[in-house]
Image (cartoon, rainbow, N blue to C red):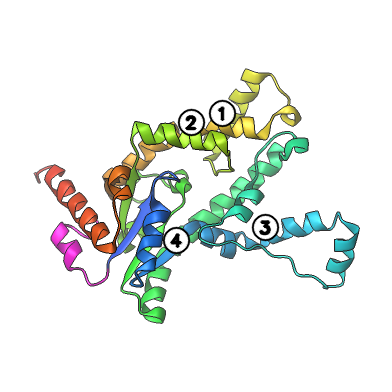
Amino acid sequence: MLYRSADDWRAAPRKRVLLFGMSGLGKTHLSNLLRASGDWFHYSIDYRIGTRYMGEHIADNFKREAMKVALLRDLLMTDSVHITSNITFNNLAPLSTYLGKPGDPGRGGLPFAEYRRRQDQHRSAEIAALLDTPHFIERAHELYGYQHFVCDSGGSICEVVDPENPADPVLTALSGAALMVWIEGSDHHTGELVRRFDRAPKPMYYQPGFLDAAWQDYRSETGLAEAEIDPDAFVRWTYARALAHRQPIYAAMARNWGLRIGAEAVAEVETPADFITLIGEALDRASRDAPAPG
């Protein structure tokens, strides 16, 4: 790890952290809190994906829909209007809308082949955005003078890495640039995340093998043709399975490449000093729990 002890962490003049874990457990809360202090640069992986790497796909999708409307078509063809997305750190709706959900087009669903194509686009974009992290660490320092850096990674980081591979290119690059910290939820958090998702199901990125198996299993269970599937029903059905699929990958990432902190403790952080203390305590625990050499 970048910081071998709590003392190393506390004494470091430049603190660099990457937060990972399921969406809804506090990554963006912590990142916003640190950024608001004025001393931390906040790098959002999802924002980078939606602007640098998938912005053109998103805007073209808007234009494709606008071209179906005669008035807008004429304006677009004469360059009289400009259509773009307005993604922010706290509003990633354009990216989610583009990623979409598979199923009945009458209920907003995409053909599964198109859905998989967009999933593949997201995978490439996420890997590229993650690999940009070291560049943004130096850019934030050299260009803006930030001493500290927090990377707010997407919940799907675990879908594009292999934490059991000591030569994984993404994890090697990230762990060399920042301290990787898993925000670990409890069973209570998992239940609440499932309930929250059930109220407002949203698009997600899935590992290709997991997604293909889930799609086939759902179709087998329901007996529905592709165009008959309720897109929201499918992603609700898939979500709890995705949590169970991701949990051991997150755990391996923390075990082999970083450390873990609890979501309950994250909820109590009110200042950057609280956060620095929390990470120091986690490093102390990791040092105590580490196997003795030899």
- The amino acid on which the numbered mark 1 sits, given as a three-letter code, is Trp
For image coordinates 18% across by 47% down, the residue present is: 286
Query: In terms of sequence position, does the residue under pointer 3 or pointer 4 come before the other?
Result: 3
Residue 51: quadrant of the picture:
bottom right
Query: In terms of sequence position, does the residue under pointer 4 or pointer 2 come before the other?
Result: 4
Identify residue for label 2. Answer: 240
> Which of label 3 and label 4 is nearer to you?
3
Left or right side of 116 for 13:
left
Identify residue for label 4. Answer: 131
Point out which mark residue 38 bears: none
Q: What residue span does the magenta drawing correspond to? A: 1-14
Whether residues under marks 3 and 2 lie with C-beta atoms below 8 angstroms apart, the answer is no
**Where's residue 245, x and y in %?**
44, 33
Identify residue for label 1. Answer: 237
Compute the Cα span from label 3 to label 2: 28 Å
Query: In terms of sequence position, does the residue under pointer 1 or pointer 4 come before the other?
Result: 4
Whether residues under marks 2 and 1 lie with C-beta atoms below 8 angstroms apart, the answer is yes
Identify residue for label 3. Answer: 58
**Where's residue 220, x and y in %?**
63, 20
Seen from the viewer's position, the closer of residues 1 and 80 is 80
Local secondary structure at mark 2: helix
Residue 210, relative to residue 168: is it above or below? above
- The amino acid on which the numbered mark 2 sits, given as a three-letter code, is Ala
Whether residues under marks 3 and 4 lie with C-beta atoms below 8 angstroms apart, the answer is no
Total marks placed: 4
Residue 264, relative to residue 214: is it above or below? below
